[in-house]
Amino acid sequence: MTGPRAFTKTYPSALASARAAAHHAWLTRHAGPLRQPAIRAVRQHLIDFDFIEGRHATAEDLPVLAAMLAQSHAAAWVSDLHRARLDTPHPLDGSGPHALADFLSPRLAALQGRRRTGHLPQATATAAERLLRSAATGSAAFYKDTNPRNILITASGRPVVVDVDDVTLAPFGYDLAKLIVTLAMTYGLLPTSAVTSALAAYNDTLRSHSHQLAGVPLVQLLAYADLHHVFTVPYLGRGGYRYPWPQVRPDLPLPTPEVSS
């Protein structure tokens, strides 16, 4: 009689698999609402996970996923990340040399790569760098590349997240913006009500965890979404990304700035 199935993922090195396992352990300890497949064994450049039966996320799952992300981000902030700085790697407790990468370093390096490959005009890259630097001054959440293929919706309707290879620090709302961008690039234009409802669910959940978590303004969420487009554009036509973000970006009214007299 055989036991439950396992899923084995191959990593480029033993260091990469050890880092993924450290990310998994940190998320399990500090971001409990983020359900993950259990690790059965770490074997050099391989990790054996519990096999999860489920479908990939769709646009209809956005409100539930937004609340799950907020619960996970808030839990991690209360438990550990209130001490973190977005511009500094954050050590992972009990994980030896491993740390959550800071928000800036990997993304500035990615911008340079996009410029070299011709995917980014200089003006776009300059604007993206300015936004990255301004975003690196607030409270720290985490980013784990939340896209439809990294979420499995089980038969019970509960989401399970996979792929913890490249968890980094990030501002609140940044991972929600990634989910919105990748859902739209995969399935097409999202209803504006879906985006605003998802943001409301995210912000309400944050505030319910701590009065110090004020929520993410819509204009900030869309700015983060445009940043994700900069990093995701080379993958258009691959991995299920069929729609360019400029074609499916929600046309949402933004708050009018107050003008002092």
Image: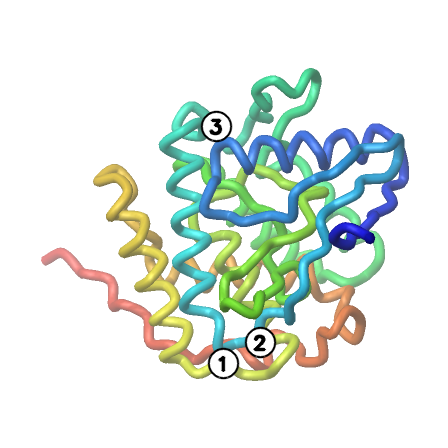
Rate crowding at label 1 as few (under 14), some (14 to 19) or many (20 or more) other CA atoms within 10 Å: some
Q: Nearer the viewer, residue 3 or 19?
A: 3
Which residue lies under the disc numbered 3?
85
Identify the residue shown where x is 58% and y is 56%: 160
Q: Residue 195 falls in which quadrant of the image?
A: bottom left
In percent of width and height, residue 185 lies at 63, 75
- Of the 4 image quadrants, the one containing the C terminus is bottom left
In the rendered structure, which disc, 1 or 3, sits on the residue that comes first in sequence?
3
Rate crowding at label 2 as few (under 14), some (14 to 19) or many (20 or more) other CA atoms within 10 Å: many
Residue found at the very far front of the displayed protein: 1
What amino acid type should be assigned to the residue bearing mark 1? Answer: Leu
What amino acid type should be assigned to the residue bearing mark 2? Answer: Ala
Residue 184 circle label: 2
Q: Is residue 3 above or below residue 93?
A: below
Label 1 to label 3: alpha-carbon separation: 33 Å
Identify the residue shown where x is 59% and y is 21%: 91
In percent of width and height, residue 244 lies at 66, 77
Label 2 to label 1: alpha-carbon separation: 6 Å
Asked if residue 67 lies left or right of residue 223, the reply is: left
